[in-house]
Amino acid sequence: MRWLRCHKMIVGFGFVLLLLGLTAAPPAQAGPWSPGAAAPVDSPVRESGARPGTLTFKGRAFDTCRAPSADTMRRWRASPYRAVGVYFGGRGRACRSQPHLSHRWMRTVRDQGWRVLPLYVGSQSTCVFARHKKNVRIGRHPWKQGTAEARDAVKRAAALGMRPGSPLFLDMEAYAYWNKRCARTTLLFVRGWNREVSRRGYLPGFYSSAESGVRHMERSRRAGVRDLPSVVWFARWGVRNGLHREPVLRKTAWAPARRIHQYAGNVRERHGGRTLLIDRNLMHAPVARIG
């Protein structure tokens, strides 16, 4: 994952409403919407709460582009990590080749004592910063596209043995959230994805940089927008790790047990005789239920 810090700040509540696209109703698939349905700004995220049987984990996690072999995972039990992020699908996924990732691998690492965080790198924001992601930007029908990619995510997750109640994290790389047209398109895509993932019994999660996608989701939450993620995974590197010190999130937002902090990236670590290039995370959040 690449983290890009956005330095521009937006001032003025009216402009914030415009950049979030709140004045426009979602597509027909989203159902009716009226400003009167907004939640208090300090309330937890609505619509997609944790379901009975959700499995949560509190501790350290790592993610890496290509799922390591089961033997490497066994050796890495010598590390301080007990959860692993895996990229299981999406048209924007960098490591498309995942020779080790299978239902058998999932069950094996589960039996070794690992928890799994499934990441889906789908279409990216129309104003994404990363050049290598510009060829997979959201198209003209963001809600419909988000819904279709959510179906694909659920299908792939189920094929790997991830049962309903598992979180599926949509990886949305850093983007110019202050661009109001782009913000509206991105939010519609994310909401469509979230609603369909939730409808199919999984938990919609969201990964992005704290200063772009996560700030955008938090402003949307405060404005009472529906169909937001159930879990947030925010990237802010070079700071002390912590789940409740993130400045763009109010302490009551995505709490309890619905946050992951990626606090360092692209670092090499060696455990059990094996070296991996990883990102470091601290978490208290749902993990995959593997059958």
Image (tube, helix red, strand yellow):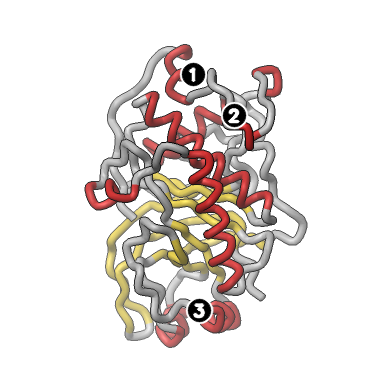
Q: Which mark is residue 17?
A: 1
Q: Quadrant of the C terminus?
A: bottom right
Contact? badges 2 and 1 (CB < 8 Å):
no
For label 2, the SS is loop
Q: What residue did someone put label 2 on? A: 225
Is 150 left or right of 184, judged from the image as shown? Answer: right
Residue at the left extreme, as displayed: 131
Q: Earlier in the sequence, mark 3 or mark 1?
A: 1
Q: Quadrant of residue 195?
A: top right
The residue nearer to you, when weighing 264 against 16, is 16
Q: Which mark is residue 102?
A: 3
Q: Earlier in the sequence, mark 2 or mark 3?
A: 3
Name the kind of residue labelled 2 in the image: Val
The alpha-carbon separation of the residues under discs 2 and 3 comes to: 36 Å
For label 1, the SS is helix
Contact? badges 2 and 3 (CB < 8 Å):
no
